[in-house]
Structures are given as C-alpha cells and as structure tokens.
Amino acid sequence: MVNIIRLDECESTHKYMRAELAGLPAWTVVVAEYQWSGRGRHGRTWVAPKGKNLCFNILLPTERLKAEFYAPTTQIAAITIAGILQKKGIKAKVKWPNDVLVNKYKICGIISELLSGYISLGIGINVNTEKTDFAELDRLATSMLIETGEAWDKEALLQEFLTEFKSNFELLRKNGLLPFIEEWRHMGCFVGYEAKVIDKDSVLEGKIEAVQNDGSLLFRTASGLQTVWSGDLEI
C-alpha cells in the first residue's frame, strides 16, 4: 500500500524524507508542488517552477533486496519512466546510469540515499515546464509539454509511475537486474558513442562498449577496457 504525503512547498522532498524517517512506513511517497532547494546528482540545482513539474521521493524497503541492487533501484526507476514516456509518444532514452533524456535533453533526474534500512528514491520529472523556465539553465533540458505541445496531468502520471514501478521493484527483488537489461539496451544507452565518465576529480575518456548484465558500463579507453560502476556520463 502506498502512503502519499502532499506538500505545497518544502526545502526538498529528499530532506523531508530524511527528517521524518522515524514516523514513515515503507512505500511512503512525499510529493511537493514546489521545492526551494531541490537538488539533483552531485548537489546540482533542480529547476522546478511551482506546480509545473512532478517532484517526489519514495521510501523503499530493503527487505528481500540484495545489497548489490540498492543502487540499481535508480536504474529501474529510469527504465520505468522512459517506458511510460515512450507510450505517450515521447522518444525517451536512458543515459547510464539513470538519467532520462529526449534527444540528449534531460527530462528526468533521479537520486537515491540509503536511510536506516530504507532507500529514499528522489525523482524529478519535467512535466509542464516551458522553454522560458529553462532560460538561465546551463544544461540542456526539456519537458513533456515542450516535446508534445500539450499539458499533462501530474497526478495521473504519478499514479501510473507508482503502479509500474512497484511491479518492477518486486521483479528486481526476485530476479535482479537481468529482466531489465535487454529493455535498457533497446532504449539506446548510447552504446558505441565516444564519451567521458566524470567521477569526483577523475575523468575517464573513451568509447561506450556495452551496458553489462550487472548494470555497470564497459568502457574502452586508451589503456584498454574498464568497468565503470558510477559517475557522470557526458556524451
């Protein structure tokens, strides 16, 4: 059963989840119409004008989930969202490890944090953001509205995602990543592209050879093949 907490505004749903953790059951979803300090990966600001986007956190249970699949919950969420967008005529792809892009423009960001036996999964989907909302953003971004020319029902999108993701999460618990790998590869994943993987102070340059069965990236560099588990992928 999903317990949804709806906030008009907050600092961030991620911080709310962390602060209120002791009183929240698994599968609590915290949704905010506006976050004044929303963040993506590596602390980047997430642009989310009030009432236009879907910004939420889900508190996932770790029981019956192997530790090696804690981090891939973000990948399963990305695959779920990309699949939903594709059904709506939006040509979404998953960029390793968990960004959802449309023509290299970011439409969804996902982060996660391990919290005392739970995973707090934070998701931001650009739903009804307009081009002017991105005017001062230094990164390429898009929205469902921009891509289709029509406004979308955020609540219906949330419910659709929760239904599909809960089913996929149970499949991850039971069978691991393997059931999702082919679907992920089918979405593109930018295999064959020249790219960089940036992780803290290190930069790895080369070519994306494959997304492996464990979700890691096989990367060909000047010194040979390397397996990459995390980092920012720049195409």
Image (cartoon, rainbow, N blue to C red):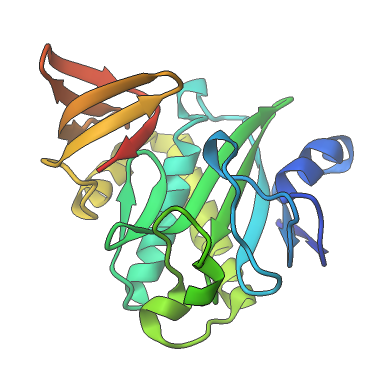
Q: Farthest residue in the right direction?
A: 23
Q: Nearer the viewer, residue 20 or 231?
A: 231
Q: Farthest residue in the bottom direction?
A: 150
Q: State the image coordinates of residue 19 (x, y, percent, origin top left).
A: 85, 37
Q: State the image coordinates of residue 77 (x, y, percent, origin top left).
A: 47, 50
Residue 33 vs 212, above or below: the answer is below
Which residue appears at 51% of the width and 55% of the height? 165
Q: Nearer the viewer, residue 119 or 226?
A: 226
> In the rendered view, does 142 fall on the left or right side of 64?
left
Residue 78 visible in the current orientation: yes
> In the rendered view, does 29 fall on the left or right side of 5?
left
Residue 150 vs 125, above or below: the answer is below
The quadrant of the picture occupied by the N terminus is: bottom right
What is the quadrant of residue 5 in the picture? bottom right
Which residue appears at 31% of the width and 43% of the height? 179
What is the quadrant of residue 201 in the picture? top left
The quadrant of the picture occupied by the C terminus is: top left
Q: Nearer the viewer, residue 76 or 15?
A: 15
> In the rendered view, does 61 fall on the left or right side of 190?
right
Residue 47 vs 23, above or below: the answer is below
Q: State the image coordinates of residue 132 (x, y, percent, origin top left).
A: 52, 75
What is the quadrant of residue 146 in the picture? bottom left
Q: Farthest residue in the front direction?
A: 136
> In the rendered view, does 33 fall on the left or right side of 200?
right
Q: How many marks?
A: 0
Residue 160 visible in the current orientation: no
Q: State the image coordinates of residue 230 (x, y, percent, origin top left).
A: 39, 26
Which residue appears at 77% of the width and 41% of the height? 15
